[in-house]
Image (spheres, rainbow, N blue to C red):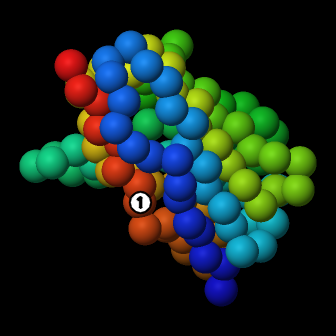
Amino acid sequence: QTQLVESGGGLVQAGGSLRLSCTASTNIFGGGTMAWYRQAPGNQREFAAGMYPNGLTKYSDSVKGRFSISRNRAGNMMFLEMNSLKAEDTAVYYCKAVTPWGDIWGQGTQVTVSS
């Protein structure tokens, strides 16, 4: 079964940038739907960004214009470029791959934005 591993999280000052990566053990991102979610302390996990097989992207209103989702040509990595970070972006970020057999999640990476 495909496994997903996020990386790139850390501590950054407000206004700064981070780039998250999600590495898959297969090229699962090559032709499927993929997404980034996040979960802040005390909150439910929420959708942040998604990319569909045709390349179209979708963003939540809270990150639109600041975050950008992408994938590599090989289809085994996806990224989340995060700019103009705010304290309210602090959360654990998870990547997800949608498959006909169900969703696959990574274990998450912590992003902390200091104000």
Relative to residue 14, is residue 36 drawn left or right? right
**Whether residue 22 can be seen here:** yes
- Asked whether, in this view, residue 115 is left or right of residue 9, the answer is left
Q: Mark 1 points at which residue?
A: 108
Residue 58 seen in this snapshot: no
Question: Left or right of 58: which side holds 73?
Answer: right
Task: Please tell me which residue lies in front, 10 or 103.
Answer: 10
Percent across and percent down for residue 28 are 75, 65
Q: How crowded is mark 1: few (under 14 residues within 10 Å), some or many (20 or more)?
A: many
Rendering quarter of residue 32: bottom right
Q: What residue type is labelled 1?
A: Gly
Q: Residue 109, position in %: x, y?
A: 41, 55
Q: In this view, does 68 lie above or below 99?
A: above
Instruction: Return the x and y of residue 20 as percentages of the image width and height.
Output: 55, 43
Examine the rendered structure and indicate whether residue 45 appears above or below residue 24.
above
**Which residue appears at 72% of the width and 55% of the height?**
77
Residue 111, quarter of picture:
top left
Residue farthest left in this picture: 42
Task: Answer left or right for 19 relative to 75.
Answer: left
Please name the residue shown 21% across and 19% down the image. 115
